[in-house]
Each structure stands twice: as C-alpha cells, then as structure tokens.
C-alpha cells in the first residue's frame, strides 16, 4: 500500500511539474516584449516584406507609434542579417496631420523616401491636396506608386504601372497595386473631373465589383506570364461593409493567383486571416491598423510557405533618418505648438467607454463643436460637419494650433449655400444610410437642427457606381427633423454652412447641393473657423458646464432601435390608459407618471454608468490571474512533496 501511494504521488508530482513548465513556457511566448509575431532564423534565401498602411502623418516615435526612424532601423537590421528585404506602403500616408497639411504631403513623401520605401499605393487621401499635387509627388519620389485600377479615362490607360516585379536573388515576386473605387467620394470628386465636370479619372468601379476584379486578375495573369513565382496584392481596399463590393475579401474571393493581400483603408489590425480565392486556394489578408501602431512583416520561407505577423515595438532608431525627420519638424514646430484655447473636457470622436470610433455613426461633443463653429461663424440656419472630416480627439487642457489642424487636417474651406428643406432631408438620409450596420464618413454631425434615425427601417438611398447620391426610393429612416425647434419644411429655403468638400465638390456622395446658390464661397478654412469660434464665441475656453460637456453630445441626434420603438409603444399605451382614468385620479396619475419617468431616466443613467465602467482586461490583471494559478500549483506541489517525503 505504501509503495502504491509513493508511485501515485510521484506521478502527480511529475504531472504538476509538467503543467508548471508548460505554463511558464507559454507565458514567455505570450508576454514577448517585442511583440514580433513572425520569428525567423537568419537565412539569406528568405524574403521579408515589411509593410505599413494608413499612417496618416504619424511619423515620430511615440507611445503607440513606431515612427519612421525605427522602421528604417529595423529594415537595416534585417538587411545586415542577410535577408532579402523590401518596404512597401498601402496608402493614406501623406495626409492626416499638421506635417501633411502644411506641406501638402511633401514632407511625408520625403521622409518615406529617406526611410527606404520601394513601393506605395495611392490611397483615397493621397488625392486630398489635389490631383496635380499628388502626381507631382509621385513623379518625383524615389519609391514607385503602382495601381492596376487607377485609370486615365482619356487614354484608357493606367496612370501608374499596374504591378511591380521585384527580384530577390533568383526568386521573382510581383506586387499588384489596388486603389478602392470609393476614392471618388472619400476624397474630393472634383479632383477627378475636368473643368466641365466630366470625369477624366476612374477606378474600375463598374459591374458591381466585376470591373475591379477583372483589372486585378489581368495584372496577376500578366505578372505570372512574366515569371512571377509569388504575387502579392497591396490594396487600399478595406473590410468594412461600406467598402463592398470592393473589400479585400471581395477581391480575393473573385480572383485566382494571389499569395497574400496586404490591406489598407479600414484601419484594421489583421495579423494574417485566411480567405479562399475563386478556386478555393488559401490567401492571407493582413493589415497593420493605423498611425504606424505596428509594422507588418511577411516572410516567404525557403520552403515556399508564407508567414505573416506584426511588429509592435522596435527599440532603436536609425540616426540618419531621425536627424532628417527632426530637421523637418523644426521647420514648423513653433507654429503648431502655439496655444490657442483651453478645454475643461475631453472633446472626442472615440467612445470613452469602449474606445470605438463613433463620430461616423453617432453624435459626439467634438462633432457638435465643429458643426456649431461652421453655422455660427457663417451666420447660417444649419451647420453640417461630415464625420469623416473630424479626425482626432482633443484632450482636456491646453489646445494648440496643431491640435486644431489635426482635428480638421484636410484644408477644406467653409461655404454657405441656400438649400431647400428637401435637400436637407436627403442629405441627412444619405448620411444615415449605414447607421446600425457600419461606419460612414458622410454621417452628419449637425448644428441648428435635431433629428432621429430609425434603424428598424432599411436604407433606401440609391447611389450610382461612384457612390454618389441619386434619390431615396422608399421610406426615409430619418424622422422628426426640427430646425430651431420647428419641424423641417421641405419646401422652405434654409441657409446651410458646411465645407466645400460637401457643398461644392460632392464629397461623400452629397451631390444634391452642387447646383445650389452659393451665398458665401470658401470664406475660411475649416480649422481656422473652429479656432475663431472657440476664441471669439467661447472666449477661448470650453467650460465643464457648457453644452459640450457630454462626450456623447447635446442630444441633437437620436438613434432608434427596435427596443426603443417597443418601449415607446408601451409608454404610449400606458399614457393613453392613464389619460382615460377618472378626473378625480388625474393628480395621482400625474405623480405616478412623474415617478415612472424619473425611474426610466435613472435606469438609463445606470446603464450608461455600468457600460462606462466596463473595461477590457489589462496586462496587469492577466499577470495577477497567472500569479494566482502559479501560486496554487506551487502549494499543491509542495504539499505533495511533503506527503511524498512522509511516505518515503
């Protein structure tokens, strides 16, 4: 019996030691400080493709941003170890912040050149400073822009080469460039037209996606015929619902011959998801997020397999690149650091409770502030600010000139037009078409009016192939629109203030305003208008008790769900029943109604508080849980060993 117990405890001890060892090893891997999810041994025959996307003018090393000098250092490190290395970008690099706004993208192009980029894709925001400006940057950069579907309609030829063949030793890899057809409306439509308003540039937007698929397939076939052993797409396509039918998944599903798809546009962080091509073959889709939060790393191994992952920390910076970057920063830092106002509250585009972007799908206090600035400074009845044009949070404290430029970095100008109530209603409906399903850069933050969006009604907005508004062919999901507290009159003419991107150029598909009478034409830049409003109308101080105190806005936009409608119906029935009671009970009923309403309000606030207190599990909490588990195992093992010693 004693021998049997001895064997049992020995076996238990071995099992616990094995489990402990397994957990420790797993912890070491999951707590890897470098967060480099592709681990490779130095082999000269391996090919490393480093990639970025949607940097949007992030360029200096900072918390949550690698910075170009670090990327340059990492690239040089891999090259020194004998790897074949190439650095590519998926678009939306030259626009998005102060450095881009002040140089119209040229500073970032210069930095990318210094960092060692070889290939880049035109994203929709590469065009934000005008077609001539972008083509000048592209024509004078050491790195090469490619796109298989950016077409000059006058010649029916691609503006850039559709793909780029790169030889790594004796292995040829083709990179196919793809630019989303949503560029028409997510940049400025006027930039793709001639002086008569005719489109002279296109993006293979027809055929419900098929024209784009055909262009991509043709480039793949041509590259393979030229000798490509691997074909990698670099696509500014995205994965969001509003990007259909041109998402990266749509493209992969409808072509054959791709080995990987380096995606951009939707700011998604994708280490390497597997999707099937038209013939059922696996294709990896990857994306690095935004603002240089990570560096993508695709490795073509010696055995032909492909590994993908993300690098989220690089300790060193390349001194030569850093010096170049710092010299550029010195040229404009004094101006951008000038304090122009202060705020007692955070002005947000992201939900403070969840961290999710909400300015493109619901009201925010920063959206309210921008729309108010446009309306009040221009003297209009109504102000619109498209959610896609409000770019970053402004933290509580001092507000610098650079902060304001980062909020409105596009350099759009504010206009005022005369528009009918019907056009106002159509615009609200256009902006609300994706609410409840996905984001939409054309979602309208408003001033001077309030409205509701009934998400139980599917959008019936009809757009053309360029995603431009045509009509509303069914029931409107936008309801109860009020201007200055009065119901919107569809036949009345209102004064509307917004940026030229929307009112004159049809941005985000808002074509309904392009024939309206212009009362004030491009009077001020949007960021200048915002500074003027805060300085002059708010005395340079956004106070904690102002209408901007609530991050979720003043309550100008109400989004109705199925549950909201059911509650409204129940309340209506309850109120009707109470109204039919005898007169001598009216007073009591009024008291009861008041208590019920207060209870409902309290419940809503409780829900908000509960949601706002929910937070994701942090690394510290994970480490605490791991400590408890390890401590428990240690106790069991010690206890077992003591028992073992007694038996022996």
Image (tube, grey):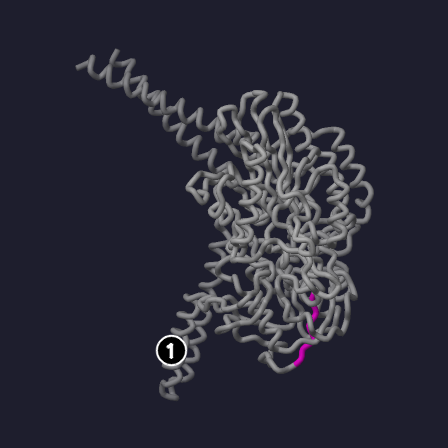
Residue underneath mark 1: 573
Q: What element carries label 1?
A: helix
Which quadrant holds the N terminus? top left
Q: In which quarter of the image is residue 388?
A: bottom right
Q: Where's residue 250, x and y in %?
A: 49, 49
| Residue 287 painted magenta | no
Which quadrant holds the C terminus? top left
Residue, far left: 1
Q: Can residue 222 be seen in this view?
A: yes
Depth check: 494 or 587 in front?
A: 494
Q: In this view, does 85 lie to the left or right of 410?
A: left
Q: Quadrant of residue 296?
A: top right
Q: Where's residue 169, x and y in %?
A: 61, 24
Q: In which quarter of the image is residue 511?
A: bottom right
Name the residue located 65 percent from the left edge and 69 percent from the top edge. 447
Q: Where's residue 420, x and y in %?
A: 64, 78
Name the residue located 53 percent from the left edge and 70 percent from the top edge. 452
Q: In this view, does 568 lie to the left or right of 471?
A: left
Depth check: 322 or 30 in front?
A: 322
Q: Where's residue 508, x and y in %?
A: 62, 61
Q: Please report the bounds of the magenta region as a residue range.
A: 493-498
Q: Is residue 632 left or right of residue 530?
A: left
Q: In this view, does 7 lie to the left or right of 559?
A: left
Residue, far bottom: 583
Main secondary structure type of the part rendered in magenta: strand
């Amino acid at each position: 019996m004693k021998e049997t117990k001895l064997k049992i405890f020995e076996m238990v001890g071995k099992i616990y030691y094995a489990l402990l060892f397994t957990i420790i090893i797993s912890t070491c891997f999951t707590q890897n400080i470098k967060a480099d999810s592709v681990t490779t041994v130095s082999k000269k025959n391996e090919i490393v493709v480093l990639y970025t996307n949607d940097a949007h003018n992030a360029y200096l090393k900072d918390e949550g941003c690698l910075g170009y000098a670090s990327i340059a250092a990492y690239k040089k490190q891999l090259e020194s170890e004998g790897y074949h290395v190439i650095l590519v970008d998926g678009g939306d690099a030259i626009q998005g912040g102060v450095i881009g706004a002040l140089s119209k993208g040229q500073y970032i192009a210069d930095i990318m050149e210094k960092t060692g980029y070889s290939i880049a894709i035109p994203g929709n925001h590469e065009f934000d400073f005008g077609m001539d400006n972008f083509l000048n940057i592209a024509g004078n950069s050491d790195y090469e822009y490619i796109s298989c579907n950016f077409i000059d309609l006058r010649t029916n030829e691609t503006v850039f080469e559709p793909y780029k063949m790169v030889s790594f030793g004796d292995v040829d890899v083709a990179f196919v460039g793809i630019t989303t057809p949503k560029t028409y409306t997510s940049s400025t439509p006027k930039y793709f037209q001639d002086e008569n308003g005719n489109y002279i540039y296109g993006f293979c937007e027809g055929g419900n996606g098929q024209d784009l698929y055909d262009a991509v397939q043709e480039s793949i076939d041509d590259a393979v015929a030229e000798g490509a052993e691997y074909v990698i797409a670099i696509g500014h396509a995205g994965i969001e619902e509003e990007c259909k039918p041109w998402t990266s998944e749509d493209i992969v599903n409808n072509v054959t011959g791709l080995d990987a798809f380096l995606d951009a546009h939707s700011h998604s962080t994708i280490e390497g998801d597997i999707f099937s091509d038209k013939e059922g073959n696996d294709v990896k889709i990857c994306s690095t997020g935004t603002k240089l939060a990570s560096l993508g790393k695709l490795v073509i191994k010696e055995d032909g397999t492909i590994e993908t992952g993300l690098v989220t920390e690089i300790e060193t910076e390349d001194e030569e690149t850093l010096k170049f970057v710092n010299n550029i920063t010195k040229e404009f830092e004094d101006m951008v650091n000038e304090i122009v106002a202060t705020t007692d509250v955070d002005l947000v585009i992201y939900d403070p409770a969840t961290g999710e972007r909400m300015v493109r799908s619901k009201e925010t206090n920063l959206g309210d502030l921008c729309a108010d600035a446009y309306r009040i400074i221009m003297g209009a009845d109504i102000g619109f600010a498209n959610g896609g044009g409000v770019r970053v949070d402004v933290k509580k404290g001092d507000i610098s000139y650079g902060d304001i430029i980062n909020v409105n970095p596009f350099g759009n100008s504010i206009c005022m037009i005369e528009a009918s109530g019907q056009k106002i209603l159509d615009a609200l409906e256009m902006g609300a078409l994706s609410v409840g399903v996905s984001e939409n850069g054309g979602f309208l933050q408003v001033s001077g009016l309030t409205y509701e969006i009934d998400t139980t009604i599917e959008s019936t907005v009809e757009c053309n192939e360029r995603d431009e508004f045509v009509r509303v062919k069914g029931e409107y999901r936008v309801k109860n629109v009020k201007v200055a507290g009065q119901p919107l009159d569809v036949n009345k003419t209102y004064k509307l203030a917004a940026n030229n991107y929307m009112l004159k150029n049809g941005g985000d598909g808002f074509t309904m305003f392009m024939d309206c009478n212009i009362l004030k034409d491009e009077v001020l830049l949007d960021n200048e208008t915002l500074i003027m409003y805060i300085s002059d109308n708010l005395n340079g101080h956004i106070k904690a008790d102002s209408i901007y105190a609530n991050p979720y806005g003043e309550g100008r936009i109400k989004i109705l769900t199925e549950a909201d409608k059911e509650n409204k119906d129940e309340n209506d029935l309850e109120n009707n029943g109470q109204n039919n009671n005898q007169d001598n009970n009216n007073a009591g009923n009024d008291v009861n109604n008041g208590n019920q309403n207060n209870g409902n309000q309290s419940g809503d606030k409780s829900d908000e508080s509960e949601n706002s207190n929910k937070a994701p599990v942090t690394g510290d909490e994970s480490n605490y849980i791991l400590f408890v588990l390890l401590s428990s195992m240690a106790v069991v093992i010690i206890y077992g060993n003591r028992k073992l010693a007694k038996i022996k």
